Amino acid sequence: MLDGYIERIRAAYADNTPLALQGGGSKSFYGNAGAGEILDTRDLAGVVDYQPKELVLTARAGTPLADIEALLAEQGQMLAFEPPHFGQPATLGGCIATGLSGPRRPYAGAARDFVLGVRIIDGTGQPLRFGGQVIKNVAGYDVSRLMVGALGTLGLITEVSLKVLPKPAAETTLQFELGEAAAIGKMNQWAGQPLPLSATSWHAGLLTVRLSGAASAVKAAQARLGGETLQDAAAFWQRLRDQATPFFDKRPLHPEVHEWRLAVKPTTPPLNLGDAQWIEWGGAVRWLATDLPAATLREAAKTAGGHATLFRGSAPADGVFTPLPTAMLTLHRALKQRFDPKGIFNRGRLYPDF
C-alpha cells in the first residue's frame, strides 16, 4: 500500500511535479489555494494499534475521524482536543495537517499536545518516522508535532500515534444572558477559579459554558454558577465545533462577507469590529463574519496581542495567514528545504511563496 505512494512521490520529485495532498477534502477550504495533482490518502486507512489501558491509539492518515471516535467511545475514551470535522469525510491526516482543535482546546490542550509520533514520506519519497507510541518519548527535536498545522507542506503524513483521554464522568451546559463585555469578564473570572470548565462560547447576547468532570464537581459548579441548563447540549457543541450554524453559513448568500478568526489575549475587551461575531475559548478566539479589509482586521488583532486568519473567503494578496516576520519566514523556508527540497507538496498552501 505504502509503496504506491512512495513511487508516486519519487516520480513527482524527479519531474518537479507539484502534488496536492488530500484526504476526505472536508478542510480543502482552509489555507491558500494549493497547486498540483491530487494525491488521495484515503487508501491509507485503518487503526494500526489501540491500547485503551495505555491511552494510546495509532491509525493511518486516511482513517475517518468518525471511525476513530466511535472506537474510542466504545471504551469510554475520546480525542480530548475535540477536532472539527467540517463534514463526514474528515480523516485523521487532515485533522493533524490542519492542526485545528474544537471547543475543549483551552481546557484540555491543542491537537499538537496529543501527538506522540508520526510516520511521513518526505518530498524525495523517503519514508521517515518521528516520535513513538509512548507518552514519555521526548529525545531530540519534537519533529512529530512540527507536522501539526503544516498543511502537508513538509511531508505526506501516513500514520499518527495519539494520546487519548477518558470521557468525563459527568457533563452539563449552562447558559447566561450577558452582553459581550460582561461575558468576556465572566469567562476570564471563571477560568481563574477551580471550576471544571471544558468549553465556553458567546454569541448574540448568550454566554454558554460547559462543565465536565467528576459528577460531584460538576454538580457543585452548577450550583455555584447558576444559569439555565441547556438541553441537547452535545448537539450544540458539535454544531459549533463543525461550524454548522447560521452564523458560519453566510457566504453562499453574501459572497462579500468573509469569515475571519482572530486569536487574541482572552482578556481583550470588545474589538468593535461589527456585531457579527462569535467568541470562543474563554475570549481567546473571536470569529467575525465581515467585509472589512484584511489590513483592518490584522491590525486590530495585532493591537490585541494576536493575529488574524482568513478562515473562509477570497484570500488577500499576502495570503490567508498573517505574514511572518523575516526571521520566522527564514526558519520556515529552511524547514521546507529540508523536508521538501523541490517544493512539490501543497505548493503555496501555507504561504504564497512556498
Image (spheres, helix red, strand yellow):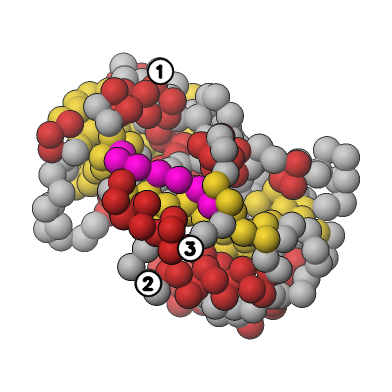
Image-based side of 8 in relation to 200, left or right: left
What residue is shown with label 3?
Answer: 225
x, y percent for residue 39: 49, 27
Amino acid carrying mark 3 in the image? Leu
Q: Pointer 3: residues within 10 angstroms few (<14), some, or many (20+)?
A: some
Q: Quadrant of the C terminus?
A: bottom right
Q: Residue at x 71, y 75 (%)?
A: 271
Query: Are discs 1 and 2 less than 8 Å apart at CB?
Result: no
Q: Residue at x 83, y 38 (%)?
A: 252
Reading the chain from its start, which is encountered first: label 2 or label 3?
A: 2
x, y percent for residue 192: 39, 74
In-front residue for pair 324/290: 290
Amino acid carrying mark 1 in the image? Asp
What residue is shown with label 1?
Answer: 43
In-front residue for pair 61/21: 61
x, y percent for residue 65: 42, 29
Q: Residue furthest bottom?
A: 303
What's the mark number on residue 193? Answer: 2
Q: How many marks?
A: 3
> Which segment is the magenta one?
167-174
